[in-house]
Amino acid sequence: MEPFWKILAEVEDADLEGVTVREVLTDDSPPVMKYEPSHPDANEDGYVAYPNIRPLEEMANFMAATRSYEANVRAFEAVKELIRRSIELGR
Amino acid sequence: LAKLKRVRHLFLLGRNSSMKLDETILGRMKLYLDFSARKQQVLTSNLANAETPGYKAKELSFGEMFRDQLQAEGLLKTTNSKHIGGEPLLLREPTVEERPTDALGHDGNNIDLDKEMTQLAQNVLKFSIVSQLYQNKIQLIKYSLREGRV
């Protein structure tokens, strides 16, 4: 039977992990083709290759990112609260 | 002089008794605060990985750890199989456990942000309560050291 503090120390060494940005990838999905023969960038068939950005998808990702950002900010504040309490123990 | 004697008496009492710090009420509260701080780490780790594909929520459970600790100290002896702590003592593995999966996202991540936030708030609250109790206990000790004078 291990003492409590030892278990806690092991927990600290356990695989708790943060996150990092590994790389920024390019979305290889095909461009949006629109038929605009009069457009200066049109190809010989009269199609213009518009960016493959889908606003709805971007917005959905954007909202998810915002939400988890806020959650992490709140976690930060929670940790600050714990530290503040710990400091007050000495008073 | 009487006061000095009393302080000395308290000191000797603490030293001679077989009670270690961990077994006093203050020690217990310290254990909980340690645990709570560690739990915060696990929760923030979960939050940070809310978008990591394949990440499984981790959990630190206090009840079992604490019971094992008490059992090890022989403080939770049981006379009936229905009492808490009736099982035999087991050697413990490190206690970060993966939370049982309820709803897996399409990327194999089972973190529920709302659940994590509730746990986080709960943890902060409990930490605050215990630290307040700790302070109160210290106040009591100070009070008796001053022989009841405010």
Image (cartoon, coloured by chain):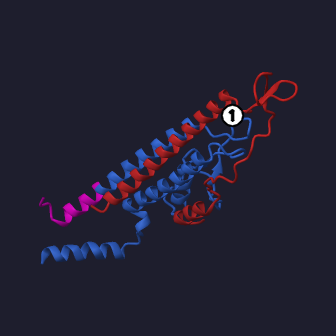
In what element is the residue under mark 1?
A: loop
- Quarter of the image for residue A63 reads top right
Residue at point 24% right, 75% down? B9
Place of residue B43 in the rendered image (x, y in percent of width and height, measured from the top left) = 55, 48
Check residue B146 for magenta coloring.
Answer: yes
Q: Which chain is blue?
A: B
Q: Is residue A30 above or below residue A45?
A: below
Query: What main secondary structure does the magenta stretch of the protein show?
Result: helix
**How many numbered marks appear?**
1
Q: Reply above or below: B144 against A64.
A: below
Q: Amino acid at mark 1?
A: Ala
Quadrant where the C terminus of chain B is found in the figure: bottom left
Residue at position x 48%, y 45% in the image: A73
Identify the residue shown where x is 32% and y is 51%.
B132
Q: Which residues are magenta?
A: B136-150
Question: In the rendering, at what x and y percent does residue A28 appear?
Answer: 79, 40
Looking at the image, which is closer to me, A34 or A6? Answer: A34
Q: Which chain is red?
A: A
Please indicate whether residue A82 sits to the left or right of residue B38 in the image: left
- A42 w.r.t. B110: above or below: above
Q: Measured from the top left, where is residue B49 in percent x and y?
A: 62, 47
> What quarter of the picture does the N terminus of chain B occupy?
bottom left
How far across and how far down the image is residue A68, in percent? 56, 40
Residue A32 seen by the camera: yes
Residue at image mark 1: B103
